[in-house]
Image: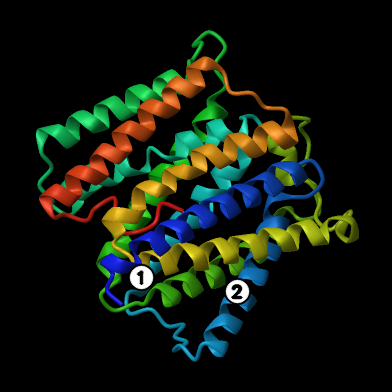
Amino acid sequence: MSTQNNNPKGIVFILIAMMVFSVQDGIMKHIYNFVSLYEIYLIRTVVSFVLILLFLIITKKPIVFKSQYPLLTFTRVILFFFGFSSFYVSLTVLPLGTATALFFVTPFLITIFAHFFLKEEIGLRRWSAVVVGFIGVYVTLNPDFSNFNYLSLLPILCALCYSLSMIIIKKTSDKDSVYTQTFTFYIGAIIISIIFYFIIGDGKYNVSDHPASQFIFREWFVDFNSNILLMTATGVTATLAFLFLFTAYSIASPAVVSPFEYSILFWSPLVGWLYFDEIPSLNTVIGILIIVSSGVYIFMREKVQNQSLATEKPLR
């Protein structure tokens, strides 16, 4: 069956993946009051690693751990790890929908980095969409500079790290498969999390009452039995979302399915509303609409120009 004929199925898979990602983020937001960030990271990554490994064994796909680009891969692992650390920390101070919306500046940043690092030609229309997109970010944040919480910028830091990692993946994908790149991240994240356990796992740096500081420096395994199911659930949901997402990109045209990643901007506010009583403000709704419109326009222009910068790889 052709890729074109699989586009509807790919769109369905994307929609399901985004729903599952929003559930995972909701779980992360729920348990940040009880466990440490890197404790979750360790459990989540181990679970995902095992599940992906089982998936490859069952489907008889090749299992390759070694990257052909060790230095670039190491850099990408660091960017991924600390990028999404910043996103999860942002959930302690931001509504789920707002944090997710701010992360979706990623297409704008990928466009900028592709121009400067990959020497891709970007036309005036896409540059204009990037500018409008950042106006949407400003509207979403609605900053009061006399009392601005700079932790609100953490999803944008995550997007920055993620965009740089996507530029690296564009370089490394010619020799490293998507599963090799996933495994290298999992192995790296497990190692970094274990190192953090020996540095901050005893809670000796947990000296602030701020929820973000508590989330990072809280003592590990204090209430492990009560939270192990939820921590395991983050790994299961992350793996399911990953498989749905990359299946969608493998069976359908990326230019067609990639705009549907923005469906998470429906699911995340819905999860935030149902489970955390978070009701988006008018500014947030308007800002999200501007970000979505600009991002989708960039995807459309890439398709017209036959370029794959922001649309080639998933945004989650």
Q: CA distance from mark 2 to mark 1?
A: 23 Å
Left or right of residue 83, residue 300 in this image: left
Q: Is residue 73 left or right of residue 207?
A: left
Specify the color scheme. Answer: rainbow
Is residue 116 in view?
no
Q: Is residue 233 visible?
A: yes
- The furthest residue to the top: 146
Q: Quadrant of residue 3?
A: bottom left
Q: Which callout, 2 or 1, points at the residue further toward the start of the chain?
A: 2
**Where is residue 202 shown, x and y percent of the image?**
81, 54
Disc 2 secondary structure class: helix
Count of residue discs: 2
Q: Residues within 10 Å of mark 2 (few under 14, many from 20)?
A: many
Give the residue drawn at x 57%, y 48%: 85
Q: Nearer the viewer, residue 31 or 269?
A: 269
- Disc 2 marks a residue whose amino acid type is Phe
- Residue position marked by numbered label 2 in the rendering: 49
Query: Mark on residue 64?
Result: none
Point 64% across, 23% down: residue: 279
Marker disc for residue 251: 1
Q: Position of residue 30 (x, y in %)?
A: 75, 43
